[in-house]
Amino acid sequence: MGWTKGYDRYLTHIDFLIKRLNMHLPKNRKSLLQLLSEDSPSVDAVDGSKLYFKKQDIEEVSKILPKKFHGSFMLPILIVRRIELGKGVFTVMGGKLEKHFVRKILGLTQKSFDEIEGGEVYLYKVQVQELLGKLGSLIVIGFEIPDEEKF
């Protein structure tokens, strides 16, 4: 019985660490259209700070993405490290449009934005690095641990 109390404390501490580790995540997101109109494009982070985007990165996305999607494409793009999926596996969070955009940028699909694919997007470390190299200021990486039952 005593070991379970210690284990529960351990799990509580891990949850606390993950929450602290993710304090840099965006509290909200903005559309590409909104960010294009801002002089200093940014969103608020969970910890109260601001996440600033490079105007050049935003303009690059606006050239790739058809204008009709600028109002619904949300930034930043959140990439989450998913421990339960294996070593170095990440997923793209967000809607179908953001996931399709990541697929396009990485050359994982030839489909146009009018043929948006659904489903999860799984990335490996090398793909995340490529994405950061192309659109670094628009990408935020978070961490997730599964519930105890999933292990």
Image (tube, grey):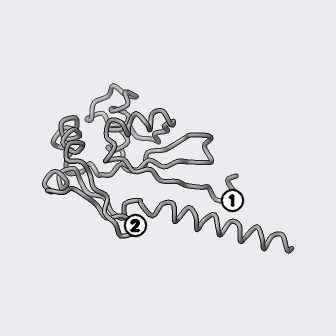
Pointer 1 local density, CA inside 10 Å: few below 14, some 14–19, many at least 20: few
Q: Amino acid at mark 1?
A: Glu
Please provide percent x and percent y for residue 13. 64, 68
Give the residue at x 48% y 33%.
126
Q: Which mark is residue 148?
A: 1
Against 102, residue 47 (above or below) is below
Secondary-structure class at tag 1: helix
* Residue 109 placement: quadrant: top left
The residue sitting at 19% across, 47% down in the picture is: 55
| Viewport quadrant of the N terminus | bottom right
Residue 38 shown left or right of residue 113 in the figure: left
Indicate which disc, 2 or 1, sits on the residue closer to the N terminus: 2
Marks 2 and 1 in Cβ contact (< 8 Å): no
Q: CA distance from mark 2 to mark 1?
A: 25 Å
Which residue matches tag 2?
A: 46
From the top left corner, tell me how far across and down residue 112 is, in percent.
27, 30
Question: Callout 2: helix, strand or loop?
Answer: loop
Asked if 110 appears above or below 24 in the picture, the reply is above
Residue closer to the observer: 119 or 24: 24
Q: Is residue 64 left or right of residue 18?
A: left
